[in-house]
Amino acid sequence: MTIVDTPERRQLRELTRAFVTKEVLPYLDDWERAGEVPRSLHETAAKIGLLGIGFPESVGGSGGDLLDSILVTEEVIRSGGSSGLIAALFTHGIALPHMVAACDDGLIGRYVRPTLAGTMIGALAITEPDGGSDVAGIRTCARRDGDHYVVNGSKTYITSGVRSDFVTTAVCTNFPGSGSLSLLVIEKGTPGFTVGRRLEKLGWHCSDTAELSFVDVRVPVANRIGPEDTGFLAIMQQFATERLSLATQAYATAQRCVELATRWCRDRSTFGRPLASRQLVRHRLAEMHTRAEAARVYVHDVAERVAAGEPVVTEVAMAKNVAVAACDFVVDAALQLHGGFGYLRDAEVERHYRDARILGIGGGTTEIMNEIIAKGMGL
């Protein structure tokens, strides 16, 4: 059976579709203009079990695995949601896994369970203003002072950084740029921890993004995730899941845009004939569909291998790049087929066109993925 073939996963798909139809679609345009989704959406998603998919019941999750998480992501977008909504509502997918993997009951009780219950929002802070993809070069420092760390530094491009109650933060526990990293959970409201400003973006408008500043912030040692100086490995171990999520967002966005463009070309007439009656249009739609489906099949194949525990770092990078390339082609073609209407905010395809641009940047740029692939080739 494939990811979508089991009865349980078909029910999960139906649950997700119903959630999007009732709780998202009537309000998504308003959230786009407000720049964030309401906290109540997290609680609603938690009550029906969607927020905890992919997290074990032992930590307050709903069970399931990576493949179930991929299914939910895919169905949210296919049902009319967006990758920006995924970023906003499921930020805990990158904020919590390190705590769960460390099996720290204290952190799980204080942060994981409330977040999966929808009463807290978490974020992950790795990127720095002058760091980009250079994780090992992180300069935000944490100096040990008795039972606390004193944190100084800054982070940027932090998804859900405005609304979050806590931030899983990568810090250097040696000298700046040494690569000796640790992860600390830093609570909003801690003296010296401030949200610098809400960042305005090309896309993902309903997903708030922030700059963060840390000035002599005292963080309890109990808020460290795992042993000191193990942060780099912890971050690397979770990258596969994040990159596959972004790959899923990419191929699902492509699939949704194929559906939107096909519907438009069947209904829209020019010179007395439906657009879909013209060979050029039919062939363009066929190429869009082919690229989207090929990306979906490959991402599913790699995800199944990751879920089975195979070390497929190169394949994950290829899956992300393949899906992003398919998405880039399809969203551009879909907007073009919509003509002038596709350029308006009233058109769903316009939102997907904007949102898609981040997918080749987040979680490791296309260029970084190519470097990983090249290394996998022995180059």
Image: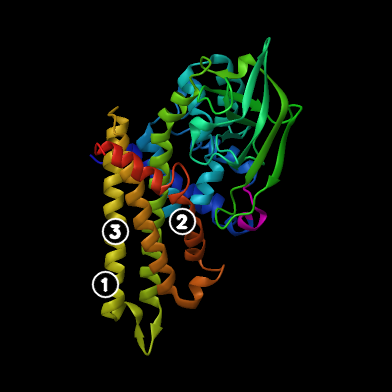
Identified at 23% across, 39% down, the residue is 1
Q: Amino acid at mark 1?
A: His
Q: Say whether disc 3 or disc 2 marks the residue closer to the N-terminus.
A: 3
Q: Residue furthest top?
A: 146
Q: Residues within 10 Å of mark 2 (few under 14, many from 20)?
A: many
List the residue tagged with mark 3: 291
In the drawing, what numbered circle is on residue 283? 1
Dot 2 lies on which element?
A: helix
Label 1 to label 2: alpha-carbon separation = 23 Å
When the figure is inspected, residue 341 is found, relative to residue 100, above or below; the finding is below
Identified at 39% across, 47% down, the residue is 367
Q: Position of residue 12 (x, y in %)?
A: 40, 41
Q: Say whether disc 1 or disc 2 marks the residue closer to the N-terminus.
A: 1
Colour scheme: rainbow
Q: Position of residue 116 (x, y in %)?
A: 55, 30
Contact, mark 1 vs mark 2 (Cβ under 8 Å): no
Q: Amino acid at mark 2?
A: Ala
Label 3 to label 1: alpha-carbon separation = 12 Å
When the figure is inspected, residue 285 is found, relative to residue 16, above or below; the finding is below
Identified at 57% across, 67% down, the residue is 345
Q: Residues within 10 Å of mark 3 (few under 14, many from 20)?
A: many
Of residue 225 and residue 377, the one placed in the foreground of this image is 377
Residue 377 in view in this figure: yes
Give the residues in magenta. 31-37
Q: Which numbered mark, 1 or 2, is in the foreground of this view? A: 2
Q: Is residue 97 magenta?
A: no
308 left or right of 99 in image: left
List the residue tagged with mark 2: 356
1 left or right of 212 in image: left
Contact, mark 3 vs mark 2 (Cβ under 8 Å): no
